[in-house]
Amino acid sequence: METNSVSTAINEGAAMAPSLPAFKGFNQNLQCRGFQFEVGQTYEHSGEVEACASGFHACEFPLDVFRYYAPATSRFAVVTLAGDTDRDGDDTKIAAARITIEAEIKLPDLIQRAVKWVFDRAKWEEGPSATGDYGAASATGDYGAASATGDYGAASATGDYGAASATGYQGAASATGNRGAASATGYQGAASATGEQSIACALGYEGKARASETGWIVLARRDDEGNILDVRTAKVGTEGIEAGKFYRLTEAGFDPAED
């Protein structure tokens, strides 16, 4: 991807082409394929730009970065792409002649941005939102978004790249399509992501999450006042995490939770 011999940092005052926001993954040293990046810097590639071959690469859909950098062992950033671009047909990856590393973000923020990314692109006349108690919202098409904001609300997204968000008390969010994101942020919320390469995120008090064999879970541990004590992520198949089973984050680590 990144090519050291033709990629250099450029001056802050250089003229900038129309830009495109995206997300990029790195190793723990903020490197990608041997190229060293710094937050706040802009870099330019000289020569042809070709997806998966040359130029600087990033993804429009936040969760697509997990195809290249695993959540638990990587760092992530919001970036801006500019200049010549070329797209990869397999996902939302884009190669560009110019990249600016805007800000580093943590995993929970990346997941929330993934949910927002889908919601921003959803056709809400076809993808419902439920705001009352015991409300149910369901989105069945690709890139569908379902939001349930009332207590005991249930949000379900069944298409690929679907996003389900449940923010109320004991809300349930379910994403069954590939590369889906299920986010439950309310008290005792449950997030379930059963599609391939999907992620389930439960960030509320006593929240629980489960994912498929190729998925990831993200859990927060809070005190009785709601203060965050810890946030951890795990790939299914590691740290004792089994596919299709709910887990909560406790002081001891990932503990099984009732369905």
Image: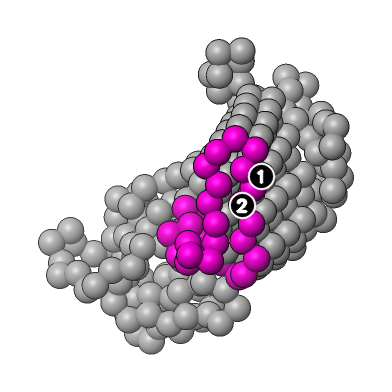
Q: CA distance from mark 1 to mark 2?
A: 6 Å
Residue displayed at 53% across by 80% down: 88
Circles 1 and 2, Cβ within 8 Å, touching? The answer is: yes
* Location of residue 72 by image quarter: top right
Would residue 189 be found to the left or right of residue 5 on screen? right
Q: Give the label on residue 137, or none.
A: 2
Would residue 167 be found to the left or right of residue 2 on screen? right
* Location of residue 7 by image quarter: bottom left
Q: Indicate whether residue 124 is drawn in magenta.
A: yes
In the image, the segment drawn in magenta is: 115-143
Identify the residue at the far bottom of this view: 48
Residue 193, compared with residue 18, is above or below; it is above
Q: Indicate whether residue 117 is drawn in magenta.
A: yes
Residues 144 and 251: in front is 144
The amino acid sitting under disc 2 is Ala
Can the viewer see residue 216 in this picture? no
Residue displayed at 52% across by 42% down: 131
To which residue does mark 1 refer? 154
